[in-house]
Image (spheres, coloured by chain):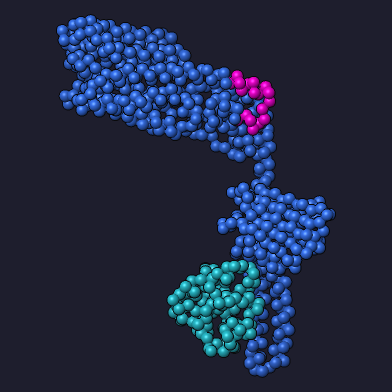
Chain colours: A blue, B cyan
Amino acid sequence: MNTLQRRVIQAGALAMIALACFSEVNFTILPGGGVGPELSPDWYAALVYIVPGSSFVLAGLIAWSLRPRNRVGLLMIGVGVGLLTGDALLKNRVGQVSPAAEVLLDFVSPLWAVVLIHLLLAFPGGRLVSRLDRVVVRSFYAVVPLAALLAVIAGYPVLGKISQPVFDIEVPAAGSIYLACLVIGSALVIRRWFLGGHARRRSMSPVFWPMVPITVFFVLATAAVLRGSVTALATVFPLLLVALPVGCLIGLLRSGLDMSSVGDLVVKLSGGLAPEQLQPALAQALHDPSLEVAYWLPAQEWFADLEGRRIELPTADSEQAVSLLGDPASPVAALIYDSSLVDEGQLVDTAAAAVHLALQNARLQVQLRAQLEEVRQSRARLVEAADGERQRVERDLHDGAQQQLVTLLLSLQVTKAEAMRRSDFETATLIDANIASLREALGELRELARGIHPTILTQAGLVPAIRSLTERCPIPVDVTGELGDTRLAPPLETALYFVVSEAITNAVKYSKGRRMCISLGRRSGFAVVEVSDDGVGGADLSVGSGLRGLTDRVAAVGGRLIIKSDLTGGTTIHAEVPCG
Amino acid sequence: MRERVLIVDDHAGFRRLARRLVQAIGHEVVGEAGTGAEALSESRRLKPDLVLLDIQLPDLDGLAVAASLSSEPEPPDVVLVSSRDAADYGPRLQDCGALGFIAKADLSAESLGALLGA
C-alpha cells in the first residue's frame, strides 16, 4: 500500500469520526435536532454511539502506524468505521434516502461484527492461522450480508429507527446476526486459546480476557432484548466494546517492549552459554517455552535436536512457524516457534542473529552426536544380526543333525524292545551300548546348541533362562528379585542372559568362590542384573575378550556394564539396560 | 491295563517308530496326527486314553495343544515329547496340564512304560 492510499484511509477514518460526532450532536444532543420534537438532549446515548467506534478507529490508526505490515490496525479501523457508519447513516437517513439505498445499508451494516471476529481471530499476527478460522471468517463475510438482506426482504429491518435511541441489537434481525457472529467467533477464539501454548496465550491475553466478559454480557443482553424485556444491558454493551481496541493496542505495544529481553539474551551470550542452554535462553527471550532449535546436518540432509535425533519441521498450516538461520540452501539451524510470533519478525530475527555464532558451535556438537548415534545404531544392528544368526544355527542343529540322531536312537530303542520280547538279551545288551554312545553324542550336541542360543530364553524368558543356568552351575547360586511381569525386548534379554552366563562361567573357572548371588530388578527405567561371587576377585576388563565383548554387547543396546573386582576378594558384575 | 494311544508328531518316521515302541510294550495305537489342529480333532473323535504329543508342531505349539486337550470335558492324559530338554521350556511345562515329559533322546520302552504304568 502506498503513502497516498494510507493517507486516504487515515483521512477517511477520521472523517468518519467527525461525521458521527456531527450526527450525534445534531440529532441526539441538540433538542429536536431535526428529527422530531420527541427527542430530548441525551449525552449518554451520544457517547454510546460515538465512543466504541471512535476508540476502534483511533486505536487502529495508532496500531497501523506502529506496525504498517500488520493487518490488526486496518481491521480495528474497519470495525470502528463499521460501527460509526451504521450510526451516522442511521441518524441521517430517516426520510432522506431512497428505499434502495436503505436496503443497501441494511445489507452492509452488520459487517462490522464480522470484521471484529476477523480481528479477534487474527490477533496479534494479523493473519488467520488455522484453516478452520479462515473458512469460518470467509463464510461470515459471505453469509452475514446475505442474512441481513433476507431479513430485510422478509420484513425485518436490520437497522434500527431513530425512535429507538439504543444500540441496534434491539432490532431482532441485527441482534440475531450479531449474536451468531459473536458466539461462534468467541468459541473459535477460546478454542485457539486452549490449543495454543504459553506464547500464544501470552500474546492473545490482552484481547482474550476482555472478550470473555463481553461475550457473556452480549449474550445476556441480546437474549433479554430479543425477549423484549431489559434494555439497560443493551445500552451499556457498546461501552464495553472499548476494552477490545485498548487491549489490542496494549498487546502490540507490549511486543515492542519484548526487544529488551533480547538484550538480556546478548548479555547471557557474552558470559558464555553451553549448547544445551541456548534453546532455553531463546525460549525465554521470545517468551515461547515451546520454542525448539533444530540443527541442520549437511551430511544427513535433515534437521536434528541437540541429541542428534531427527526433527521434522512443521508444515505451513501448522500452529508453529519456522525461521531458517543462515543460507536457506544450507542453513545453520531452524527456529521452530509458536506462530503467534510470526508478526514479531524483527524480534525473532534479532534474537536469531544474537545466537547465530553460538548455534554454529552447537551444531558441531550435534553433528558429532548424530554420528555417534549412527554408530550406536549400527552396532545394535550388528549385534541383532549376529543374534539372529546364532538362533538360526541353533535351529538348524536342532532340526537337522539332532533330529536324525534322535530318530536313529528311537530306532535302536525299538530294535532293543523287540530283541527283549524275543528274549534275545545278548543283542539287547549290544544295542544298549550303542544307545548310550548315541545319547552321549546327543547331549554334547544339545550343549553346543544351547551355547549358541539358549532355547529357553526364547521360549520362557530371561528369568527362567537364568534359573536354568544356575541349576547347571556347580557352585550354589542364590537368585533374588524379579524383572516384572512384562518381558524385555529380545535384544535386551539376550544381552543380559549372556552377561549372567559369562559371569557364571568365569566364576566357576577362576574365582574359587563357594557361593554366588544373582540379583534382578527394575530401577528408574532400567533392567538391572548383578552377579556377584565370594571368590578371589581380580577380574580385569583388559585381560581376555569375554568381559570386553560383554561390555560391547550391553553398550549396543544402550546399557552399561560395571565390573567391581579387586584382589581383596569377590567380583561383582553389574549390567543395566534401558527398558522404557 | 492296555491303553489306547494317539501319536502326534510332524515327522512320519518318528510316528512309525513311536507306534512300534508303544505296541512293543503292549498298548494300542488308535491313531496318528501330524499337526496341532489334527491332534485336537482326532482326540475328540477317537477319545484315546493317552496322547503322545510332540511340542514342536508346524501349526500350533504342542504346549498350547496340551492345555487345550486338558480343558476338554473328558481329557486324555498327555505325555509331551521333544528333541529339546525339559529345561529348555522352563515353567511352561508345568503350566500346560500335561501328565509328563520325555525328551526324545530318553524315549524308550522303559521310560514310556513307567509313565503309562506298564
The image shows a total of numbered marks equal to 0
The quarter holding residue A228 reads: top left
Residue plotted at (53% across, 26% down) = A287
Q: How far across and down, in percent of the image, does residue A462 sit?
A: 63, 60
Pick whichever, A565 or A407, lies toward us.
A565
Q: Taking the image as drawn, is residue A12 in sight?
A: no
Residue plotted at (68% across, 41% down) = A372
Q: Which residues are magenta?
A: A262-279
Most prominent secondary structure in the magenta stretch? helix
Residue plotted at (43% across, 17% down) = A249
Q: Is residue A424 magenta?
A: no
- Tell me the quarter of the image containing the N terminus of chain A: top left
Q: How far across and down, in percent of the image, does residue A502 sit?
A: 74, 59
The quarter holding residue A216 reads: top left
Left or right: residue A527 versus residue A204 is right
Q: Is residue B109 above or below residue A291?
A: below
The quarter holding residue A354 reads: top right
Pick whichever, B6 or B66, lies toward us.
B66
Q: Taking the image as drawn, is residue A220 in sight?
A: yes
Q: Is residue A74 above or below residue A197?
A: above
Q: How far across and down, in percent of the image, does residue A58 sit?
A: 38, 12
Q: How far across and down, in percent of the image, does residue B64 sit?
A: 52, 69
Residue plotted at (72% across, 82% down) = A434
